[in-house]
Amino acid sequence: MLMESDSPVSKKSRLVNSVDCAMEEAPSNAVGANQSLHWTQWQVLENTGSLLLPFVYCASKSPDTAAWVKLDQLLEATLTNEVGRKASTSQGSALLRVAASVFIEIQALQDLRRTLLSSKNVSFHHAPIFGLICGLVGFDSETVQRAYMFVTMRDVFSAATRLNLIGPLAASVLQHQVAADAERMVQKWRDRDVSEASQTAPLLDALQGCHAYMFSRLFCS
């Protein structure tokens, strides 16, 4: 006869309880070990809001190809390091190809891909083309700016996960925790003209320029 403590029911109860405890403890332990990532996250969002959000806003509020070309050229002159420029144009041109392939009913996107994608007069930087595409699709400028900040926040945690600095669960928890701060930064920098665009984290810009000299290049963005 089996002892009560060795019964299948008892074993199942102990197993369930141990799993529940592990699931409850994992988020707090993971987050506590990675609180320093908040500072990097805030700095990146602040710089994105001050420098790039004006380009997203101006491109989305009145989605016009001629106006977008001027924004693209201005950002090309504004970005100060080659690594940042290449990453921005690579992501922007890829985004246009995807958008033009998906939204075949939007003629402006088809014209952009056909006439300007191979042109040397435009660079297809990510921020203005993101704003233009979202504006052409029908999103309002407030939603577009918030979406761009979310993409930046998501990419920071994605990079940290791929570098094995944090796990996927901890990344989700951290993303939730900084949501309020991200919203405050959106409200701080939203609806600004490109004449107000500024670099608030010059050290990030300088470090990004060193990426080309690394032996192992992990990311292009």
Image: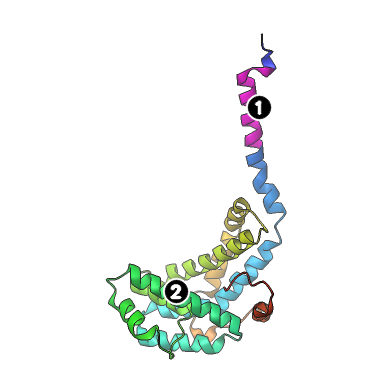
Relative to 8, is 110 above or below? Answer: below
What residue do we see at 37% from left, 85% from top?
A: 116
Q: Nearer the viewer, mark 2 or mark 1?
A: 2
- Residue 8 part of the magenta segment: yes
Q: Tag 1's secondary structure?
A: helix
Which amino acid type corresponds to the residue marked 2 in the rendered image?
A: Ala
Mark 2, residue position: 94
Magenta residues (range) = 6-21
Colour setting: rainbow
Q: Amino acid at mark 1?
A: Arg
Name which residue lies at 40% across and 88% down.
119
Q: Residue furthest top?
A: 1
Q: Is residue 14 magenta?
A: yes
Tell me the residue that label 1 is attached to.
14
How busy is the neighbourhood of tag 1: few (under 14 within 10 Å), some, or many (20 plus)?
Answer: few
Question: Quick check: can you spot residue 73?
Answer: yes
Dot placed on the residue nearer the N-terminal end, 2 or 1: 1
Instruction: Judge left or right: residue 72 versus residue 101.
Output: right
- 41 relative to 5, above or below: below
Q: Would residue 71 be found to the left or right of residue 46 on screen?
A: left
